[in-house]
Image (spheres, rainbow, N blue to C red):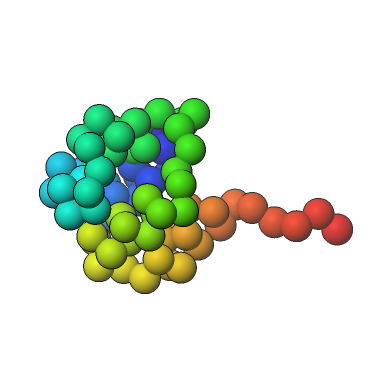
Amino acid sequence: MTKLGLYLAQKSVNKSEVARKAGLSKARMNELTLNERSHLRAEELYLIALAIDVKPGDLLEALCNHLSLEK
């Protein structure tokens, strides 16, 4: 499961409902939540955040908080 999948599961979000609200196919939502090799596009992140009623920046931070700049 991807970080997005874990995030949605923690929030008890219905993936089918999110896909519908965000205008994504169920297949694409499954790919984004189950396949580690899938790449979440910025537009998709934004629409998913709107669909689950969170700030896009908060969702981005939750998904990318493991990243840091090299020193």
Q: Residue at x 16, y 48 (%)?
A: 20
Residue extending furthest toward the right:
71
Position of residue 64 measured from the top left corner of the image (x, y, whole percent): 54, 54
Give the residue at x 40% y 66%. 56
Side of 25 relative to 49 (left or right): left
Q: Position of residue 45 (x, y in %)?
A: 39, 54
The image shows residue 11, relative to residue 38, as above or below, that is below
Q: Position of residue 9 (x, y in %)?
A: 26, 46
From this viewpoint, is residue 51 visible? yes
Looking at the image, residue 18 lies above or below residue 38: below
Q: Quadrant of residue 29?
A: top left
Residue located 46% across and 47% down the image: 41
Q: Classify the position of the C terminus by image quarter.
A: bottom right
Instruction: State the residue at coordinates (41%, 54%).
Output: 43
| Image quarter in which the N terminus is found | top left
User: Which is more toward the observer, 15 or 71?
Assistant: 15
Q: Is residue 18 visible?
A: no
User: On screen, 70 above or below 36?
Assistant: below
Considering every residue shown, the one lying at the far bottom of the view is 55
Looking at the image, residue 25 sits to the left or right of residue 43; the answer is left
x and y, in percent, of residue 40 in the image = 45, 43
Q: How many marks?
A: 0
